[in-house]
Image (tube, rainbow, N blue to C red):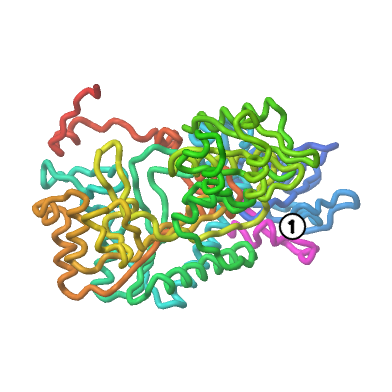
Amino acid sequence: MSFRTEWASQVTATLTGTMVTIAGWVQRRRDHGGLIFVDVRDRTGIIQVVADPKGAAFATLDTVRAEYVVSVTGMVRRRPDGMVNLDIASGEVEIVPSQVVILSQSKTPPFMPQEAETVDELVRLKYRYLDLRRSSLLHNFELRDRVLYSLRNFFHEHGFLDVETPALARSTPEGARDFLVPSRVQPGTFYALPQSPQIFKQLLMVAGFERYYQIAKVFRDEDLRADRQPEFTQIDVEMSFMDREEILSLMEEMVKRIFKDALGVALQTFPRLSWEEALHQYGSDKPDLRAGEPLVDLTSQARSVSWEILASAPHVVGVICRQYRPSRKMLEQWTEFARERGASGLIWIMKSEDGIKSSAAKWLDGEELLALATNARLQPGDTLLVVAGPKPLAYVVAGQIRLEFARQENRLEPGWRFLWVTEFPLFEWSEEEERLVSAHHPFTMPVAQDFELLESNPAAVRSEAYDVVLNGIELASGSLRIYRPDLQERIFSVLGLTQDEISEKFGFLIQAFQYGAPPHGGIAFGLDRIVMLMAGAKSLREVIAFPKTARGTDPLMDAPSPVDVRQLDELGIQLKPKT
């Protein structure tokens, strides 16, 4: 038999008077005065089926229930006046069935897909196959498919090769925790699931592939959030013989293409800020440009005031709140907001037609307050919230106030606000490890002018790294790569690796660079994050088919789970209680 001749959304008024066969799930069944109305849902939409007691298929249709799987053959006719539903593609017509075949029955579901949004998420994840029947989730995956189709076309047009890299690799000392996989044939040794195909794609550049991409599954054993999962998909890209400007331009073109193809949105040119500029202007290395104007640096102006506490503060940063007259209670809440984030407090300055008011009026005279307000370009009705302290604390706290103010007052501007952030620090200090670690990864190229600082002042070395930020969320991270073996060894040494450790962990990479490595660079975009933002979803779980919970569990498969003792014995593993 033929299960289907048309999708539900294809059964429109143009097919009136013709016989069709549709197949799908029963979304709803209704009895009205002897007539039976059944809405049949497939991936594309819903079509109404109507049978009366005299109809050939009435008896069968009378037995169907919610979520039964059926195939219906019948005549397409127009709906009666007043019964048209313009919200669906097939809303002008209905099917009068001549045959109904029940392909599969369904128990009463724990929840109806169309009502799933009101159900606890753990329940929905346990029955994810029912949750995925929601049209809103289905639309997310249709969007994801359009994005991938656009991506592959773009890369093909620009000469990239799609190359798969290993899922079993070597554990590396940098980055997040690895998921380890024990080797049965070599007891006591382990593979690691890749956090990134980083080394492999660099080796592909050494091999002469020149332009590589991969829609890669990667794994990181780290704490989870709404925008983070233990396994996720990234758009992994690497290019040879291209400088930073060429890479940024090409990747910006790629992002513009997928937004145009998948959403019909034409994006503007992405502005660029160095990491230092982003920190000073927005207090963040992933600033949300929708949250209003930048921070204002008042440090120089504060040097001339009489209040020693403000005058001697390393940095003084202001948040401009246009046409905002907060209550005393709200000002106290902003002060507490700043303290909770590490600042010693907060100063507020209000400008009105009558003059200046400030929480610092006891220590600053009118002229000093007016000078600060003027420096911040305050207009009557504006309020300035000021944070003082060391760098980066003062900027970071002020940046958080800027963003929270925009959220609380519903002042986040609509639209897609992209940004390139460049020249991150090459190293950062790890309090946990009490040593310098790579801010991105140890294969990142330092800015050429800073080579001489590698040993003398490594904390001041800038990197040829770059991120793509959208509406305050990091979408991609990349860099130019080190391709000289001597420079790569210097970086490893700064990170505290001995020569033996370098040889043991990265000897194969150093050796590869000795056989003619081209200049190269790359980037990796978080596909799930891109689709999440494009879809307006609240979390990554809405755009990943079978996601994990915030605790890293899969309620559907009940994973992770214990394994048989025999499996552990084969691997030479003995479990011990966790203390």
The residue nearer to you, when weighing 286 against 551, is 286
Tell me, yes or no, if residue 57 can be seen here: yes
Classify the position of the C terminus by image quarter.
Answer: top left
Counting from the top left corner in percent of width and height, residue 55 is at: 78, 48
Label 1 secondary element: loop
In the rendered view of the protein, which quadrant contains the N terminus? bottom right
Between 49 and 130, the one lying in front of the other is 130
The quadrant where residue 424 appears: bottom left
Q: Is residue 320 magenta?
A: no
Instruction: Please say if 363 is above or below 353.
Output: above
Q: Quadrant of residue 467?
A: bottom left
Q: Does residue 386 appear to the left or right of 435 in the view shown?
A: right
Question: Which residues make up the magenta segment?
Answer: 1-26
Q: For mark 1, does the 10 Å Cα neighbourhood hold few (<14), some (14 to 19), or many (20 or more) residues?
A: some
Residue type at tag 1:
Ala
In the image, 571 versus 151, the foreground residue is 151
Quick check: 132 left or right of 553?
Answer: right
Residue 3 belongs to the span the image colors magenta: yes
**Residue drawn at (26%, 65%) of the image:** 482
The percent position of residue 134, horizontal first and vertical second, equals 61, 44
Q: Residue at x 77, y 52 (%)?
A: 87
Residue lying at 45% horizontally and 42% vertically, measured from the top left: 314
- Tell me, yes or no, if residue 29 can be seen here: no
Question: Which residue was labeled with disc 1?
Answer: 89
